Image (tube, rainbow, N blue to C red):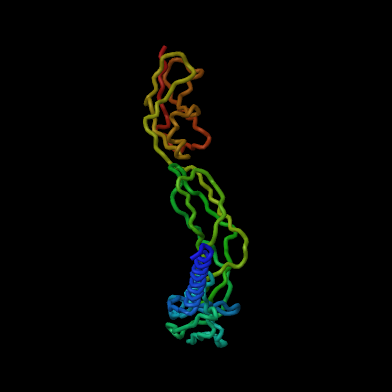
Amino acid sequence: MTGSTAAFNGRKILLSIIVLAVAGGIGFLNYQRRSKIETDLFVPIETDIDSRSITVMTPQSGGVNIRIRGPAKSISRLSRNPVRIRLDNIKAGNGIQTLPIDRLKIRLPSDVSVVNIRPETVTVRIEPLIEKSLPLVIELRGKPAAGFTLAERIVKPETVRVRGPESVVSAQTGIRIKPVDIGGVSESFEKRVVPDLPDPLKRVGAEPFILKLDVREKIVSTRLAGIPIEGRGTAQIFEISPPSLTMTVKGPLQQIQRLKENPDFAVYVDFTGLGPGVYVRRAVILLPVDIVLTKTDPELFTIRIKK
């Protein structure tokens, strides 16, 4: 066998292999196209109607299970284009209706068919759609920082207009806002909030809701005992009896807790212009602006100025 003959035979064999491979690939693709599988799908039921509300009573899942048959490739595409069943055979009027599922109206690729549907009927309740304005209920979580309290809470607007099935709307007395966390806050603030609408209610309008929270220092009434009394306005030796008093004050908690350290706080008897002798006087009590004196015990003090 010459070299040219051997080369020719080699090319012939290679060409035969390529032809067989292509034929096999085409055959495999044709097999895939002809090969069909079966699988189950959950299909939600669409119930939107402009003038009426439709609630699926059974099945409670709000959809049906269908078994379909078709090429695997076509079925895999359904994950990108979910199947829906739209009820278009609803009769006029309100009330409860049982409706058959028409398999021919289930939108599927042309090479995919429905094997069976479970259940084959759905029961729906049909009622009017109504609108109603309902008060917003403020929902808060947590507590302000120690020594602070929430003095006032206001949301504007105070009501939200909703639309939905008559039975659901009529049962509502108010709509809660989604909870707002106030844990550890120590100052007032404003925040945009959102109504937490129960299904299937829809909001009418798009006006924003603003929550205003007034956070203030906690106001307390406290009894302070053993407050020493100073003497001012004399260089002479003196005695004050009793030497201390008990006082009740009202004001912000943190200011009262730090009252004795406050330079604006003082308790004293003014001796200015007094000579040696015995006198009965009231104590002068100076307090920061935000703290109010409500009671002292005793109110009068005996002072002795020595010669």
The residue under the point 46% across, 44% down is: 148
Above or below residue 42? Residue 116 is below
Return the x and y of residue 161 as percentages of the image width and height.
58, 67
The one of 86 and 245 positioned closer to us in this rendering: 86
Residue 151 picture location, percent across and down: 50, 49
Report the label total: 0
Residue 278, can we see it? Answer: yes
> Residue 222: where, in percent of width, then height?
41, 39
**Residue at the image point whose x is 53% and y is 50% from the top:** 213
> Closer to the camera, 262 or 207?
207
Q: Quadrant of residue 160?
A: bottom right
Foreground residue, 179 or 145?
Answer: 179
Residue at screen point 37% across, 26% down: 242
When the figure is inspected, residue 17 is found, relative to residue 49, above or below; the finding is: above
Q: Is residue 276 left or right of residue 7?
A: left
Report whether residue 282 is seen: no
Which image quarter is the C terminus in? top left
Snapshot quadrant of residue 129: bottom right
Seen at 62% across and 63% down, the residue is 206
Extreme-front residue of the structure: 1
**Vertical position of residue 256 compared to residue 266: above or below:** below
